[in-house]
Amino acid sequence: MLGLIKKIVGTKNERELKRMQPLVEEIRALEPSYEKPSNAELRAKTDDFKRRIHEATAQAYAALEEAKARAAAASGEERERLKEGLDEFERQLRKTEGECLDEILPEAFAAVREASKRTIGLRHFDAQMIGGAVLHQGKIAEMKTGEGKTLVATLPFYLNALTGRGAHLITV
């Protein structure tokens, strides 16, 4: 019975892959427009992405800084109470950043794909785009030897580095 259900509904992995297919299509559709710009214009995309993230998070960042200033100016129990409330402002900032990163993900991945083609002659395959999106979501992407794990890692690494918070990439 379980086998029949899996054939009809699919495994969790198959459903996840199907769910991500529109994202791959969106990135693929952007590819021709990312092949046209010069290297300098392609590099300028990074500044555009950073600007968009900054604009989207400016209000949340300002609220966090204001809360930090209020906490620093307070004393005693009030200071401790305000410091505890800073976590909520930080969560809101991270949530806003995450939403913005999810929004620019297709464009950022298309830019990385094109930069990779130009610099090292390797083009990310669709399966690698899915792997990059999975890693960006904080999930684990299992890949076999030779499937391009290091190349996959460049996608979420670039995307998440755009926030300016710093990013670390460790590969074997």
Image (spheres, rainbow, N blue to C red):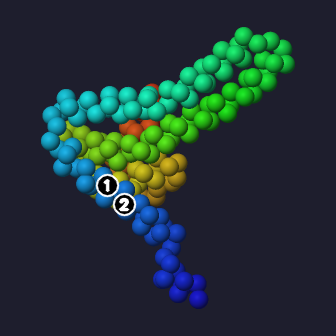
Q: Quadrant of the N terminus?
A: bottom right
Q: Amino acid at mark 2?
A: Pro
Distance (Cα) linking label 2 and label 1? 6 Å
Which disc is residue 22 wearing? 2
Residue occupying the far front of the picture: 59
Between 82 and 137, the one lying in front of the other is 82
**Left or right side of 39 for 1:** right
Q: Compare residues 52 and 118 and report the one nearer the observer.
A: 52
Reading the image, the residue beneath label 1 is 26
For image coordinates 32% across by 31% down, the residue present is 48
Corner quadrant of residue 126:
bottom left
Badge 1 density bin: few <14, some 14–19, many ≥20, Cα 10 Å = some
Image side of residue 132 versus residue 85, left or right: left
Disc 2 and disc 1 in contact, CB within 8 angstroms: yes
State whether residue 83 appears in this view.
yes
Quarter in which the C terminus is drawn: top left
Q: Secondary structure at mark 2?
A: helix
Relative to residue 67, is residue 151 drawn left or right? left
Characterize the local packing of mark 2: few (<14), some (14-19) or many (20 or more) Cα atoms within 10 angstroms: few
Q: Position of residue 156 (x, y in %)?
A: 41, 43
Callout 1: SS: helix
Picture coordinates of residue 55, whole percent (x, y): 43, 29
* Residue shown at the point (18%, 49%) measured from the top left: 32
Please determine whether, in this image, residue 123 is positioned above or below residue 51: below
Eyeballing the image, is 153 above or below 29? Answer: above
Residue 135, numbered circle: none
Amino acid of disc 1: Glu
Give the image quarter of residue 80. Answer: top right
